[in-house]
Image (spheres, rainbow, N blue to C red):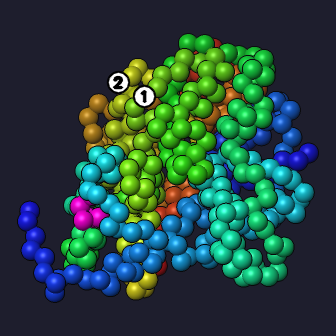
Amino acid sequence: MSISYYPGCTLKTKAKNLETSALAAMAELGIEVEELPRWNCCGAVYSLADDDLIHIIAPVRDLIRVKERGHDTVITLCSMCYNTLARANDLMKHDEEKRKTINMFMDEEPDYAGEVRVVHLLDYLRDDYGWDKLKEKVKVPLAGLTVGPYYGCTLLRPREVALDRPDKPTLFNEFMAALGATVVDFPMGTECCGSYQVLGNPDAALKVSYDILNDANQHNIEALALTCPLCDYNLGRRQNLMRDKFEGVPEIPVYYFTQLLAVALGLSPEVCHFELNRESAIGLLKDKNFLKEVPA
Amino acid sequence: MPQKITSKSIDDNLKRRAREISGQIAQKCFQCGTCTGSCPMIEHMNVTPRGLMALLQWGQADKIAEANTPWICASCHVCQVRCPRGVELPKVMEALRQVKLRTNVNQIEPANLQPEEIIDLPQIAMVSGFRKMTS
């Protein structure tokens, strides 16, 4: 086993449905991962100030834990964790001066120079596992489900850590197509959901999320698939709030990509914790007859 | 709206600090407005990202202080990937936030957030929001 798994803070509580479905799906696919011992919060956002190295310490510590385990790859599920870890890794690999300063500051840790590969489950499935192999494992093709892949920001930007072309990505489309779904591209699928502005400017964040849902609806998308707990909150949970503020808000269930993966692999819905999604989420999957056994 | 700029109204100090913190040279921007056209939060800003770059080029610290632009920016980086001049605007926004935050001033006050507003928020929302908007 040579792959570490970095969960991040949100996946143990609010986004348990992302973690449990991913772990069950990876086990089914034969992808062996080991949760990183003593992992800490990555910081959620990568520091953009050139003179601020202290906020690089947390993600680098996580990467050192991976190296200590003797693993060459760390797999992430949350897009924000992916982005933060990948950018910290990039810095340690390419910026000699900052690498020196950070290594000297963490004198209790072994030196680190970006030796670990940071991946997201989506690009791992594309590059290491392969879509063809994934297709063979699909037991319940999501035929007839019209899905909009919502990429958001942090899988695609900035360019240094982009999993695909930032302007016209196909990665998520290919993943959903491998599961048998009907994939519909929509222009706002790579736009920001408002992100952390849900805290600072909640109304502004609500408006951009509403615009995204509307765009999806205009493209006849039945469901959104995404990879980030903050996008899930803004686009999924806040639909009720949107209804109070705007007219004609469509009801669009929002799923983590791993939940749809688990369903397509024929796993029990219990591993998906649909109770943490919008109520319409499990309903749509039942209507489509994708769920073999539904918990009472 | 035309603005009168004199040698007295140019604040080189802010320009220098923004450059130190961001590593970005404001003068590289040639005012094409691609950032403004790409920004998903634009309708909530009182100064466009392009406008903010112009103010920074001319060291208009007072006008920049009135702009809500850096506080509305969600660091989505779409302006950065599209900038034909390779200006990393999210870093400029971060620098302008930091100039204020480093005076020990918070943009949002965690203690004032009501429990019902935050109870359902995912942890990454809190961590990232506080990282961007508190000192």
Q: Are marks 1 and 2 on the same chain?
A: yes
Q: Main secondary structure of the magenta part?
A: helix
Q: Quadrant of the N terminus of chain B?
A: bottom left
Q: Residue A79, image x and y in percent? A: 60, 48
Contact flag, marks 1 and 2 (Cβ < 8 Å): yes
Residue linked to disc 2 = A218
The stretch of residues the image draws in magenta is: B50-54
| Residue B133 visible to an observer of this rendering | no
Of the pair A262 and A271, the residue shown nearer to us: A262
Of the pair B109 and A215, the residue shown nearer to us: A215
- Vertical arrangement, residue A235 with respect to residue B116, above or below: above
In the drawing, does residue A67 fall left or right of residue B60? Answer: right
Letter of the chain that mark 2 sits on in the rendering: A
In the drawing, does residue A257 fall left or right of residue A224? Answer: right
Looking at the picture, which amino acid does disc 1 mark? Phe
Of the pair A217 and A112, the residue shown nearer to us: A112
Give the structural element (helix, strand or loop) at label 1.
loop
Q: Confirm whether the magenta stretch covers residue A110.
A: no
Residue at 31% in and 48% down = B34
Q: Which mark is residue A2?
A: none
Residue linked to disc 1 = A186
